[in-house]
Image (cartoon, grey):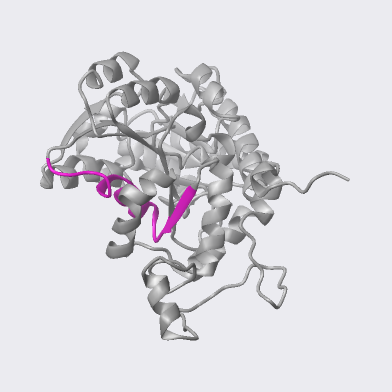
Amino acid sequence: MTDKKEPKDWRLATKLVRGGLNRSEFGETSEALYLTSGFAYEEAETAASRFAGEEDGYTYTRLSNPTITMFEERMALLDNMPIAKATATGMAAVNAALMSQLHAGDRVVASKALFGSCRYIVDEILPQFGINVELVTGADNDAWAQALSTPAKAVFVETPANPTLDVVDLQYVCDLAHDAGATVVVDNVFATPILQRPADFGADVVVYSGTKHIDGQGRVMGGCVLCSEEFFEDHLNQFMRHTGPIISPFNAWVLLKGLETLDLRVEKMCANAAKIADFLADTGALTRVLYPGRPGHPQHKLAMKQMSAGGSIITMDVPGGREEAFKVVNALDIIDISNNLGDAKSLITHPASTTHRSLGEEARLELGITEATLRLSVGLEDADDLIEDLEQALGRRSS
């Protein structure tokens, strides 16, 4: 008879389905949804002990809740990290991961290629609190070496980046950052914990928008911060406790159920994306096609070193500017126009006018986001139907 395995020793698919499971006395098979804001105590002494941290138990859903705990424990298992704290949105996770540890006078080094709202935090919000920010080209190791030759408090990267799919050498940057005294925060949304685990390369904190692949069906908002016990106790715990970015129990329950099929969905999305990227690159109808899983991507080897597949996102440039890009988008029959991603349905957006509009034209062009750029999030439809939809849309544009 073999010894009983600990959850951390389970294989991926088992963690996705059973991680964090905590059944009530009723023995439900589907995780229980605890829609409650507060909790009752048998005695006043129990309440006092819980608030003093002397006794385990729940006190208030703004701090924690049994349903939220199950989602958090499952996420921690997936990323091989000790602590996970769920937030109301992905941006709440990013903000908490940064603001909980930073003070006036601290220095942050971040990659230039970030989601528009992430860039707003590092460009606009952090400087308001006297925090110094230096931006570098994420794919340029020399730029990282120069920036991190000076001490820093935090490093923030997104890899692959939104929407340019730039890839940051995580091991290299983490080593430099730690030598500079910095905590490394990685936005792992595009790769998901299925394709890439930043902690394996030295990342200290990992953030997700659960709204994307983790939900995967466009239903709810949510996010997550993963970190060490030390980071949680020194920074994140009190920040989350008193500023209130916690996820709702219902949203946590939806994301918890989404995790059960995450690996299956991501695997299918990646297979579809790889096939579609090859088609788009071979059509000759586009001026640029970026997909980390294709040899044509400038950092393909690094991407495949860090990721187990190329991901579900393809970025492309249409000949001409915004008008021509809009013609292609408007001609699509199956693929929806939406700024979300990681959905079961394939979605396309024009970053310059949506997700990265707030950057301004000069900053967008520096990143390689032009008026001709489109970002395609590949879903679970039949890849051939998606290819035919793209083919007819590109044909209608040129006719």
Q: Residue at x 68, y 42 (%)?
A: 9
Q: Quadrant of the N terminus?
A: top right
- 351 displayed left or right of 108: right
- 318 displayed left or right of 301: left
In the image as oriented, which residue stretches furthest toward the right?
1
- 109 displayed left or right of 25: left
**Residue 295 percent across, percent down from the top left:** 55, 17
- Which segment is the magenta one? 83-104
Whether residue 10 is visible to the viewer of this picture, yes or no, is yes
In the image as oriented, which residue stretches furthest toward the top?
142
Which picture quadrant has residue 320?
Answer: top left
Where 373 sits versus 22, above or below? above
Q: Residue at x 52, y 26 (%)?
A: 306
Q: Residue at x 67, y 39 (%)?
A: 384
Decide whether residue 87 is among the magenta residues: yes
**Residue 266 percent across, percent down from the top left:** 61, 43
Whether residue 38 is visible to the viewer of this picture, yes or no, is no
**How many numbered marks have been drawn onto this rendered protein structure?**
0
Decide whether residue 171 is among the magenta residues: no
- 331 displayed left or right of 99: right
In front of the other: 174 or 365: 174
Where 27 sits versus 353, above or below? below
**Residue 392 percent across, percent down from the top left:** 55, 39
Which picture quadrant has residue 142?
Answer: top left
Q: Residue at x 30, y 40 (%)?
A: 352
